[in-house]
Image: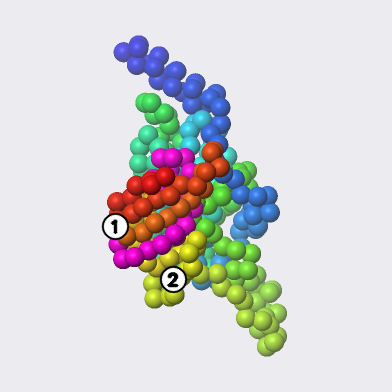
Amino acid sequence: MIHKYIAAAIVAVVLVVSGCASVPMANKGADAEAKQFAPIADKATVYIYRDEIMGAAIKMHLLVDGAAVGDTAAKTYVQIFLSPGQHVITSKAENDTTLSVDVQAGRSYYVWQEVKMGILYARSALHLVDESKGQTAVRKCDLVRPADPSLHASPSIARVPAPEAMQSVTDNSQSPTPIIDTPVSAGATAPATGGPASLDPRVTVPMFNAAQDVAAVHQCDRMIRVESIEGEHARFFTSCPSTTARLDIECNGNRCIDVN
């Protein structure tokens, strides 16, 4: 029994004092904009934050509806924009934990990715928290660059105006129509070669996830781009920062391999 306590103590020390995990970070401007907590007119804004030092050496993966949205480290958060409706958030650590959220357009939601002590490395849990607690925690963290840019808003996206601004718009019939930043719909024209796979209506979710898995194995960018698509056969590519090389990926349905 005493050996179990000693092992647990060692794990706890390692989780606290180990070096910090490295994740791709957004620039300071994007971080400052996200912390304005301004909702989006036609999307729900979801902040998933990890505000603890414990488990700093462990990078935790986040998925929404099965698609990767980013990795977190200690004192970081991701900001994503979702269509109204039901979504499933997954946190992958020593365990996999999920949280189902029903979101509405024009509202913001805050999810705490709690870090817990595990057997081999850190575990996690997801909790939907109130706005006050969520905003306080997010302000103490730094923004992670999203793995899927289609879930990230550009500066031109239409935001819900503050009450005083709404009155101003109502009184001014000449106000310009805001530009909405939305993903390509299923019936839209396919993006040109080199465009993001996440925005291409010909790319299925299983195929996209399989291609991202190949990129992750090679420690390459999970921003997958389209080379060519013919039915179930597709070729993608992405960059690999560690080697400055390009990774070519070939998929048949949801089976993908690297072809370098």
Q: Earlier in the sequence, mark 2 or mark 1?
A: 2
Rendered-image quadrant of the C terminus: top left
Secondary structure under badge 2?
loop
Q: Which residue is mark 2?
A: 190
Rendered-image quadrant of the N terminus: top left
Give the distance between the C-alpha atoms of the residues marked 2 and 1, in whole angstroms.
Answer: 18 Å
Amino acid carrying label 1: it is Gly
Tell me the tag on residue 253.
1
Magenta region: which residues? 212-232
Tell me the tag on residue 121.
none
Would residue 19 be seen by someone viewing this image from the given angle? yes
| Residue at the limit of the structure toward the top, as seen here | 2
Question: Residue 128: x and y, percent?
Answer: 45, 51
**Which of these two is toward me, 239 or 108?**
239
Whether 226 is among the magenta residues is: yes
Residue at 41%, 28% in the rendered image:
121
